[in-house]
Amino acid sequence: MAAAVCAMGAGSTGSRLLRGERECFTALEHRFAKFKGTERSLYFGSGYLGNLAVLTTFPEAGDTIFSDQLNHASLIDGVRLSRAKRVVFPHLSPGAVPGGAFLVTESVFSMDGDIAPLEDYKKSGCALIVDEAHAVGLYGERGEGLVGGGGVFVSVNPAGKALGVAGAFVAGPACAIEYLEQCARPFIFSTAAPPAIAAALDASLDLIAAEPERRERVRSLSGYLRQRLTEAGVDVPPGDSPIVPVIIGENDRAVAIAATLQQAGFDVRAIRPPTVPPGTARLRVSVNVNLSEEILDRFVKCLVEQLCAASS
């Protein structure tokens, strides 16, 4: 990325439909589409912009969007800004969604770390839109995420999590991406990202291809942490996603426990309403590849001590 700044400068100067277009973006989009198993992809400056673009461009007046009740705020805002009818359905409930509509979901949910029943959704006959923020780079045979080209209308793939950079790729069939490129206001009227970001993302895709042990290690550590917490009497959902929610309940208690854990050296944050439903304030533990079983053991011990102290 540093070398690319020296070669191409720090800014892009305008929209990609004007002076902001660079060959590095086009080449990266082709590479990402191949990585994702789709015909094309289109890069946006953030996942928020990508979700708003998809949901304000494709669904039209007379359409219906079914949105999972625990979807990320950017999906919720995109649905609200759409001209389509909006229906919020119970979390992870494929039976609640009829065919012929748009279905919007995350693949790995950002606050609970659970996984959507994507195969069931594919069978529903809906146009499926999937946010892969917490799956791309970690799941899939090649790190491509939990959805490829088959059975999904488009996927939104933010690049600030496992890919480690910024922005997002919307991936899907060529006709959909072409339509998005010509009609999505968040794309048309946004200044293009700095060209050096393309170089950083290119390097990120190199790492994902060359070092699959990184994503395997993250998921192994996540499973280990969940097992150790369960053995210690802390109720956490099963699975191997790196997002591990520890439900505390009360806002002040969650903040106090998080502050104590931070003082002990663990960068854990309290998440409170309105980000999560009332009464479900939590510690959102996020596992990364640089941790070890020994660190996780110390974290579990410290957390259990704080939970016991807070309830006594």
Image (spheres, rainbow, N blue to C red):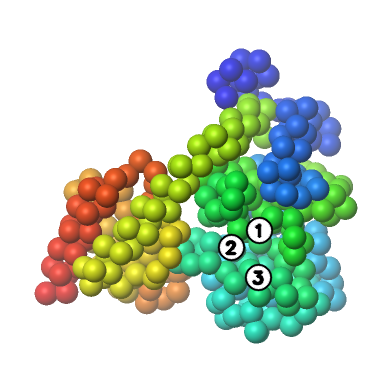
Badge 2, how many Cα within 10 Å: few under 14, some, many 20+?
many
User: To which quarter of the image does residue 278 belong?
Assistant: bottom left
Marks 1 and 2 in Cβ contact (< 8 Å): yes
Q: Is residue 51 left or right of residue 246?
A: right
Which residue is denoted by mark 3 in the rendering? 119
Residue 267 vertical position relative to residue 277 in the rendered view, above or below: above
Residue lying at 45% horizontally and 48% vertically, measured from the top left: 216
Q: How many badges with numbers are in the image?
A: 3
Give the image location of residue 282, x and y in percent. Answer: 35, 66
Q: Inspect this view and state whether residue 194 appears.
A: no
Q: Is residue 8 left or right of residue 182?
A: left
Which residue is denoted by mark 1 in the rendering? 147
Residue 293 vertical position relative to residue 236 in the rendered view, above or below: above
Q: Which mark is residue 267?
A: none
SS of the residue at dot 3? helix
Residue lying at 84% horizontally and 32% vertically, measured from the top left: 18
Instruction: Measure the C-alpha gap from mark 1 to mark 2.
Output: 8 Å
Badge 3, how many Cα within 10 Å: few under 14, some, many 20+?
few
Residue 6 vertical position relative to residue 45 in the rendered view, above or below: above
Q: Is residue 173 left or right of residue 134?
A: right
Instruction: Measure the C-alpha gap from mark 2 to mark 3.
Output: 11 Å
Give the image location of residue 248, x and y in percent. Answer: 30, 71
Q: Which mark is residue 107?
A: 2
Give the image location of residue 22, x and y in percent. Answer: 77, 28
Q: Amino acid at mark 3?
A: Glu
Q: Amino acid at mark 2?
A: Ser
Q: Earlier in the sequence, mark 1 or mark 2?
A: 2
Marks 1 and 3 in Cβ contact (< 8 Å): no
Q: Amino acid at mark 1?
A: Val
For the residues carrying marks 2 and 3, which lies nearer the camera in this image? 3
Q: Inspect this view and state whether residue 100 appears.
A: yes
